Amino acid sequence: MQFNQNYLRLQESYLFSDIAHRVQKFAQAHPDAKILRMGIGDVTLPLAPAVVSAMRAAVEEQGRAQTFRGYGPEQGYDFLREAIRGYYARRGISLAADEIFVSDGAKSDLGNILDIFDVCNTVLIPDPVYPVYVDTNVMAGRKIVFADAVRANGFLPMPDEKTDADIIYICSPNNPTGAAYTKAQLQAWVDYANARGAVILYDAAYERFVTEEGCARSIFEAEGAEECAIEFCSFSKTAGFTGTRCGYTVVPQALKRNGISCNKLWLRRQTTKFNGVAYIVQRGAAAVFGEEGERQIEENLAVYRRNAARIAACLDRLGVFYTGGKNSPYLWLECPGFADSRKFFDYLLEKAAVVGTPGSGFGKNGEGYFRLTAFASEEATAEAAERMERLLG
Ligand code: PLP
């Protein structure tokens, strides 16, 4: 018996456990300090009332013999897939219901999708980025090459003809940098992928945060994307589902390689290894697309946008370089006066009791940068901005 040796090649997430440890130590040493947590990627506002009431009604249905439902379709109920189809249609993107797969969140699908790709493929991953892409490929033993996301390219790497890749990850708006591709930039990636027969894995977990004209919210805004791209979406950050768990993945029927349908393989994978998302949760998710639900989640998003604007204004006044905040709940700043992002983390914690995330946790290009999030309460965000201004001004 042998364990999967690739797991031994994973980098221990020292940074994130180390951060938690340091915050805990600080809290113990300063029991009266009000620690402001601006580092977490979790939401704080509750579910929208329309979602709660849809879920309540679904609980009632599950409690009555006449309306009880057992196993549902692995790909998701028609009512939710239709609602998602409508959401895309309103943005001018035409999908068929069987191209939409409902899941318990983007993270699972981003990891699970790798089941259908050979281990001999080379993957291209931006650096810095959400660490799940790297770790899931290390687990499988796939070769990884990196696309540098740096200040010079606005943290938005573009295709490089010299790089050979079979699977390309794009995260837009990006975690952690907050940078979002325009439709024209995505078109270049789609053309590059189609020319090489590569597949793009497009993570749109933050698409609803996009506000700037010209920035894309879906890879399917680019022509020909249905022949090369899979899109991952989530209700987590846009509708507060981080603890409720629901997402969806779009696998176009037109995406084929060597005559093999990607949609067919993913359907086979899901029907074999996945038994669907709870009916109650899917009813809640469908309510997000109703008139009331849309309005209510937009109200919540407006709070996070105000928070982002408040942090951005503080950084502007301090003259600190940053990106993000406009199309994203993340602000990505150059550590003022520090080359080492962990040292800046310590400084901010010790002197202002404000917690952020050192950029080095997201890849080598993240060193020297720092991620702040807009997900804290408005009060905590205002106070954190004040404290940072006092400390760094
Ligand atoms: N994709 C990105 C870029 C994320 O930042 C996150 C969560 O932080 C996820 C996916 C995970 O989303 P979910 O909660 O749907 O699993």
Image (spheres, rainbow, N blue to C red):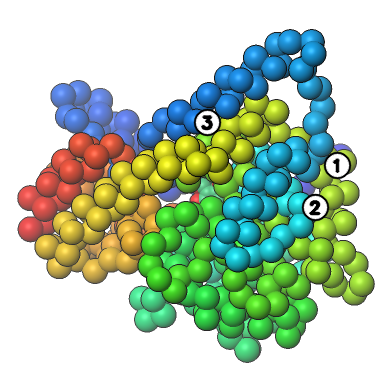
- Of the 4 image quadrants, the one containing the N terminus is top right
Q: Earlier in the sequence, mark 2 or mark 1?
A: 2
Q: Which residue is mark 2?
A: 98
Q: Is residue 50 visible?
A: yes
Residue 355 vertical placement versus 56 (above, below): below
Q: Which residue is mark 3?
A: 51
Whether residues under marks 2 and 1 lie with C-beta atoms below 8 angstroms apart, the answer is no
Q: Amino acid at mark 1?
A: Thr
Q: CA distance from mark 3 to mark 2?
A: 24 Å
Q: Residues within 10 Å of mark 3 (few under 14, many from 20)?
A: many
Looking at the rendered structure, the secondary structure element under dot 2 is helix
Q: Nearer the viewer, residue 78 or 192?
A: 78
User: In the picture, residue 75 is in which quadrant?
Assistant: top right
Identify whether 228 is placed above or below 266.
Answer: below
Asked where in the image residue 56 lies, by quadrant, the reply is: top right
> Mark 1 — residue?
271
Q: Is residue 155 left or right of residue 87?
A: left
Question: Which corner quadrant of the image does residue 226 belong to?
Answer: bottom right
Q: Residue 60 in the image: x percent, y percent?
A: 65, 14
Circle 1 — which element? helix
Left or right: where does residue 371 sit relative to residue 51?
A: left
What amino acid type is highlighted by mark number 3? Val
State the separation of the CA atoms marked 1 and 3.
27 Å
What x and y, as percent, mark residue 25?
A: 29, 31
Q: Amino acid at mark 2?
A: Asp
85 displayed left or right of 256: left
